Structures are given as structure tokens and as C-alpha cells.
Amino acid sequence: MATAELERQGTSAGVTPSRGTGADQARDVFVTLTVGGQLCGIPVLVVRDVLGPQLITRIPLAPREVAGSLNLRGRIVTAIDLRTRLGLERADPRRAMSVVVEHQGELYSLLVDQVGEVLHLDPELREENPPTLDATWRGLSKGVFRLSGQLVVVLDVAAILAI
Amino acid sequence: MDDLLAEFLTETAESLAELDTALIRLERQPDDGATLSQIFRLVHTIKGTCGFLGLTRLERVAHAAENVLGRFRDGALAPTPAAITVVLAAIDRIKVILAGLEATESEPAGDDSALIADLNAVMEGRLPGGVEDSGQPAETSPVSDIAPARQEPSAAAPSEPADEAGAAVAEVAAAAGSSSASAETTAPAEVSVAAQTIRVSVEVLEHLMTLVSELVLARNQLLQLARTQENSPFAVPLQRLSHITSDLQEGVMKTRMQPIGNAWNKLPRLVRDLARETGKKIELVMLGADTELDRQVLEFIKDPLTHMVRNSADHGLEKPEERRAAGKPETGRITLNAYHEGGHIIIEVSDDGRGLNTKRIAEKAIALGLATEAEIAGLSEQAIQQFIFRPGFSTAAQVTAVSGRGVGMDVVKTNIEKIGGTIDLRSRAGLGTTITIKIPLTLAIVSALIVEAAGERFAIPQISVVELVRAGGTSETRIERIDRTPVLRLRDRLLPLVRLSTLLHLEGEPQSLDSEAFVVVTKVGTQSFGLIVDRVFDTEEIVVKPVAPILRDITLFSGNTILGDGSVIMILDPNGIARAVGLAASGGAERATMTDLQAAGSEEGSKTTLLLFRAGGTEQKAVPLGLVARLEEIETDRIERAGGRMLVQYRGQLMPLVALGDGLETAGAERRPVLVFSDRGRSVGLVVDEILDVVEDRIDVQLVCDRPGIVGSAVIAGRATEVIDTAHWLRCAFDDWFHLDANRGSDRRARLLVVDDSAFFRQMVAPVLTAAGYEVTAVDTAEAALKLRDQGRVFDAIISDIEMPGLDGFAFARAIRSGPAWSDLPLIALTGRVSEADMARGREAGFTDYIAKFDRDALVAGIGQALAAREVVEAN
């Protein structure tokens, strides 16, 4: 099982070194991921794990966005298909990677196309959502970071899980 | 919080619980020296510790109470109920102060001088103001010639809940509400046992339990792996690990087991107070208090149990005078009974009170909009009683301080179901109510059956699985269908089936009926149904984990778990499934029997429950609801025509339809209400335009009508209403409807005399009997009937109402039996009220048979029997 535990402060390989170790700095650190070709970021503080493809049990009658549940070292984690949540086509659970987040004491795994790296993002590069952004995305995004080559959409985990 | 203070609070809370029980025991047995000493010692300890900690307010109250108890102990003062009440008040005050102390870490301000004055007054042998003096208990009891101690509604407990036998285990319970970690305790009486116990915080135990559960799962996973490898060097140590794990699991479970008496120990006091408050005499009997169950389960059922006992005391039991009038002993009895039954605990709470008032429940259900009158009319008494489990339901006319606040049985049911338990209710008017709860011994690990549907696996808790049936394939049993509904013949009964994959909206090839499938026969409450699944695997011990919050809305699952192979599996909730398929919605889908309806309608004298509807034209029409078997809605495009008749497939049969009023030609595909009349396995539907209402009214047919199918017009619910002649319409469907068993082998039409003051019943009964082949004469009074006798009229049988103005049925019967002409005629009582006592009285007066109004079958059969018997007599 391709399980990569992340350090809380995010100092794994391929990460822009963060400028400090205090809580203030940690708030600016994000795990990046791609969903349907779009680069997104999730605050590293809520991320508990990153997993490779998992065996996922389907849950009948659950909302469409719920891909199922999986066993993470004895804990049952509900998998949310981020693609479906963002109004894209359903993810292939055999290939999707998972970002496990904690929300109100419960673990959820967000199925994404690819998990990128852990980045420290300068708060000054952050902008509000463009008002013309699709309503689904606007409701789940907390702003956009302008990086040199690309844009990173900051995902609002609480909003994503409010299904 | 100061450690010392925390420990004091914990210890005192325990002592107080013991005190409550002990004081009530003392009240019952004033000369019980051991109990007295125990009480004295407990209060003394509290007082001493207060002084040590500088809690002056507490100390003063405890001191005054101790003085009174000291006098009891010395025999200088009799522990009368009045005196005990004052002591209990002091203990309540101590609890209040303790609660304040716990919240703020300092004694709350307050004035105890009045209480202390009362206590001192009692100590000096005078009863204080507010409590009547006379050596009699302060209770407002109508009977005063019984010894004081016995007069008090006492809490008789054959097995004392908080007695010392349970003390060793009880330590854990007491620690539940405390924050203290571990401290030695000394239970008062059984020092030897108590000294061997330590106090462990519940948190530690919970954590241990979680760890053990995980260990069990890991062990299962390992075992599964090992099974695939032969000659593994791990096999032997793994076996050993497995055993140890099992033992460990059992051991940890044991630490969590507690006698159910721990959940009961507050009840004697509660019942005593309630008895005083409500002026009732109540005896609380507790059986099986030492039955052990998991602490967590115990916590869950504590409040529901308290609530149920409170309900029984407040609503269930009657006041002494009412009980006396009903011929019952003055003292009402509430019985708690707990016992083990196959991995479960059964707890029964029963009372010998007045039983549930089904009528009031029905009224309330309608008022709350939970059901329409028409729906209620189709429900059995038991089904109506189930409404008390609906949220916001309370039939107490007056909200008392005790109960009846509308937060009650629904919460009880929810709590019980939350822990995988079931709740069942039986109530009989005048005899009492019994509520039976079945709960698992422990919540941590349950046994579940693993099944597969559409390629997905699910777990079904073993508690609700009755049996497994293999159907289709090579098996002799097969699933049949009515319309699109699958059913199974199981031991001469039809079991409704639900296909799990359909229920869960799982895609997959719809299986043909012949392919092999398994039916999991499931029982929820009184309802059984079968779940069709594709495969059945083993049973597994599973650790139930709650589902994520975003999945809580799916009521078909009660939780999820991880199986031995590491995969996640959803646990099905049989209660939820029953609700989803509409089986448990009303606690029973079976329709009310005729007798239920009559019982419901008979209490209102000659008032009748009528169904009002519209069919052709604008005037309202009426039919006695008792004659209607069901109300249905049928899509007009499902109606088929054959041989000039309209038919519809209904419950697996073809049912003829008769359109009352407007034809159906004009209608497109729409739903039309249908009144279904059932008889001897056959049904006829009367298609009407609209169901208006169900009312209870007196029927007085004022205009008799010549039109076929209409009995006449009456004013019902303030409007002119046509009362329909059901017999006419039924004959339209089946020509022989009333000819099935009338008048066999008789050339002459037997002559019947019908005596009934209600024009309506004469109008209803006469056509029925005429149709059955009798010659019917109807009169409205017994006097008129006797006049016919004096005129020399001859009849073969007489059918008479009981309640009539002038001569009533009994007097009429006696008059007939005494007179010469008709003295040997069969005399059948036709009445709304059929009780054993009435029947006995009727027979005594001279009635041959007793038949319920509306029960046409019984009437026709009864007349047939009576006439046949007479023929035999005459032949001899």
C-alpha cells in the first residue's frame, strides 16, 4: 500500500522549504493536488495522510459524492470523490489517490487524480475567487494563489464535506 | 478541583444513593436495626467529612438529620413516614448543595433554617408545620385504619437493588460520573468484598475495550492470512495468541458488566415520591436485579427505564378509589423484570393499571396530524397503541410535573433502537400495560450474518435474523410473485419479501425467480419479512462503529465495521428496513378486525362511526365504517373490463368494482378512492368520487328512499346525507353475495322479527336478512314487539337490540321467556357491546345468542344455527 505519512509541518521531499516552524507559518503550508487538471491546495494542518489507490466499499443510498468507505489502519474513513463534488466526471477508484483529512474528529479521504507536493504559499499572493468562477467551484474554494507558472485553488474542506 | 474535594463528592454521591434506598427500606421495616445503623453511619460520615473540609452549610443540615436518625436508632422516635419525609428532604438539600459545590467548588448560598427547624422538631418528637401531626403519615390517603408504616405506598423490592451483594461490581458504576481516578473504598457492610475492589475511571475501561476490539480484529486478520498458508511456522503461536486474545476480550468485557440493579436503585425513591405526589398507592417489584449487562448499555437504558416507570406510576396506575371501583386491590403494582435470553437481556416494565386508552390515542394521533381518521379506522388496536412511540405524543390530558410533557416514549424507543434493541408494547384495557425491551448484552461486539447482494457484502445483526431459507435453484421452496411483489410461502403463511439489491438501489441483473437466492427471515417487533440476498456467508463477530456524520441520514444502516479480511462493510438496520418498506410504520399493517371497530364504536351508545364520501352529485353519502374493510386508491387505467364488469387486480385476486355514481368512462388515468368490502375471501370495491371524512354521529334516517341502493336520508355532521345500502351494491357485484349459506334445505322462508330502536339499524339489518333469504319484520320498540305477540303473530326467531328506550333488551327477553307464545323462540341479542359480563347477563335473561352489530357474517350464521338447533329440537 503506497502510504506516505506526511510530517505536520510538511518537510517531505519536493517541498519549498518553509520559512519557519511556528503555527503562523504552518497555516500557509498547503498540500497540492490535481483534480481534473486543476491544481488545488488543502491546508496541511487538516491533512492526516496521503494514500495510493485503496479498496473502497461502496455505500448504497449515499450521496453521489460519497465514493464509499475504506479501512485506514483499523479506522473507517469515508471517501469523498472530489471530482464528483466539483461537478466533474466520477473518479476511477482503482487509480485515484487519497488525501485523508480530519474534520470535526472524523476522517475523510478525498479522492483526487494526483497528489503533488507540500508548498509554503505566500499569503500576499492570495486573491479572492474570480466572481465569474463556476458556482460549484466558488462555493468550495477559499481563494486562489497566483504562482509563477500556475494558479492554485485553495479548497475549503469544511464546505467540501458539507454534503 | 481540589483532589480532596473531588474525592469527597464522589464518595458522598455514592453514600446518598445508598441512603435513599436504605431510608425507604427503613420506612417499610421500622424495626430493622441493621438498616438504621447503616443510615446513621452514612449520614454521620457525610457530616464528619463536611466538617473536616469546612463545608459549614452541609455540615449543619447533615448534623440536624443525624440527630433525628440518632433518635430513630435509640428507639426514642418511631421512623414514621412523615418523619422519613423530612429526613429525605434533608438528603435532597444535601444533594442540591453538593451539586453547587461540584459546579463552583464552593458551597452555594442558601438558607436551610426552615429545614433544620423541621428536623429539630421531628427530633423533639413534634412533627413540624406542613406535615400533619397525629402519628399518621402525611399522605392524603382515604384509608387510615392501617398501621402507618404499611399505609405508605412502599417500594417492595424482593431483591434490593443497591444491596451489598452487588457492591463489588457496583464500584465501577459509581465511578461513572466521577472524575476520580482510583481510591480504595469501603462498602459499609461487606468490608471483605469491598476492600478487594479498586476504582478505575470509565475512560480507562473504554480505552481498554477499544484496544481489545482492535486486537480482535487484527487477530482475525492474521488468522485469515494464516489459513492460506499451510505449515506456517506461525500457526502454533498464532493459535495461542488467538486464545489469549479471546480470554482478554472476555476479561475486559467482564469489567464492564454491571448488575441492572444499578440502573434501578433510584426507582424506589422515585416511585415513593410519585405515590405521595399523586395520592396513589404503588408497590414496586424488582425481579432479576442482579442480571448483568454492559455498562454502556446500562447507561443507555437508565433514562428510558426511569421514564417508563414514571409513566406507569403517573398514567398507568389508577388512584386507590378508582382501583377499588374497578374491583382491583388499592395498591397498584409496577413490576420490573430482567433476565437473560440467548445473548440478550429482556427487561419488562409492567403495571396492573388501566391500560392504554386506544380511543384517546387515536384522537390525539388525528389531532397531531399523524394519521387521518380514515387511516386510524383501518388500524388494529395494537397498531394504534404504537402511536405513543411517535415524537411529541402524550395523551395525558393534563401535563403533570411528573410526565406527560410529550418528550417520552419516542425518546425511549429511539434510545433503545440506537443500541440495537427492540421495544414491544402490550396493553389491555383495565388490566395494565407491559413494555418489553430486548437489548444486546454488549454493544461492543455483536454477532452478524454476512450476506451478499449485487456483488456487495452487508452485515445483518444476528439479533433480528430468525432463519435462513434457500429458495429457487434446486430447492423446493420458491419465491412467488403477486403483481410485482415477491412473497414466500413459509409454513402455511405468506412472508412479504424485499430484495436487498432493489432496496439499496444497487444495479445488477434482475434475478429470475428460478435462480438460486437466499431469504433471510427477519423479525422486527411483531413484523416478519424476508430479505432476498444472492449469497450468505458466515456469521462474524463484528465491532459496530458508527457511520460518518454525512451518512447518518441513511436509515437502512446502523453502522459499519471492518471484517477479518480488512474490508469495510456496512451493517444493515432491520428496523430501518422495516420502516423503509412500510412494515413498521404503524407497528403492524394488519387491518383492524371487525370486533376492534365495534369495540371502538360501542362506547358511544348508539353513535356510529360513519365514512362520508361523495359519489355522483354533490350531496354527501355515508356508510358505516364498520362495514368497510379497507380504503384504497386505484388507478383507473388498472381497471380491466370483462363480461360487462369492471375488475381490478387486488392483492393477488380479481376484485369486481362497482361505480357508485358517475361512471369511469370520462376519467383518464387518475386515482380514484375505492371502498373495499371483504367477505369470505372475496372483495368488492365501490368506486366513489371523493372520501370526505369519518365522523361519529347518531344516525336517524328521516326520509326513507325508494331509490335502489339508498337506504334513506339523514342529517349527519350537519348536512343532509344519503345513507347507502351496501347490500344492494354488493349484490351488483356478486349476485349470490348473500345467498351463500342461507336457508339450506328449507322450502319455507323463515320469519324473523327485528327489534331495534334505531331506524338506521333496522334499515341496515333488514335488507341484509332479506337478502339472506328470510322474511323480515322490523319494529322499533320492545313494546311493539310484544304487541305483535299478543296479536298472535308467528316468527321463527327474534333479533333484538339491548339498549332501547322503554323496555330494554334484557327486560324484553324476560318478558318473552315468561310469556306463553314465544317462550321457546331463538332470541338473538344484537348489540354494539360484547363483553363476557354482558353475554352472561344476556344468557341469564334468556337470549340464545349474542352477536355484535355490523358483524353480518356472525348474524347470518347465528340465525342459521339458532334455527337449525330449533329444527332438531322440533324433530325430536
Image (cartoon, helix red, strand yellow):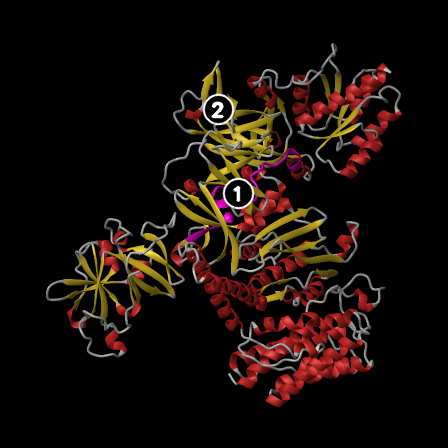
Which residue is at 85% across, 16% downward? B874
Image-based side of B571 in relation to A134, left or right: right
Residue B114 vertical placement versus B669 (above, below): below
Marks 2, 1: nearer the viewer:
2
Give, as a three-letter code, the residue at label 1.
Ala
Q: Residue furthest left?
A: A148
| Magenta segment boundaries in residue numbering | B569-596
Residue to which mark 2 is pinned: B648
Using a 10 Å C-alpha cutoff, classify the residue at mark 2 as few (fewer than 14 neighbours), some (14 to 19) or many (20 or more). many
Q: In the rendered view, does B74 fall on the left or right side of B445?
A: right
Residue B29 against residue B229 in the figure, above or below: below
Chain ID at mark 1: B
Q: In the displayed structure, would residue B287 be above or below residue B509?
A: below
Could you say where residue A94 lies in the image, as x and y percent from the top left? Answer: 28, 52
- Compared to residue B375, the image places residue B864 above or below, namely above
Q: Residue furthest top?
A: B747
**As rendered, which of B797 and B816 lies closer to the eye?**
B797
Q: In screen coordinates, is B773 left or right of B404?
A: right
- Residue B699 location in percent, x, y? 64, 31
Residue B587 painted magenta:
yes
Q: CA distance from mark 2 to mark 1?
A: 27 Å
Q: Secondary structure at mark 2?
A: strand
Instruction: Looking at the image, tell me whether mark 2 or mark 1 is earlier in sequence order.
Output: 1
| Residue at the (72%, 67%) spot, across then down | B160
Q: Which residue is mark 1?
A: B371
At x 74% / y 57%, what residue is drawn? B332
Q: Is residue B714 magenta?
A: no
Return the x and y of residue B283 as percentages of the image width and height.
74, 61
Helix, strand or loop at label 1? It is loop
- From the viewer's side, name the closer residue of B747 and B605: B747
Where's residue B236, x and y in %?
48, 62
Question: Is residue B121 among what the camera can see?
Answer: no
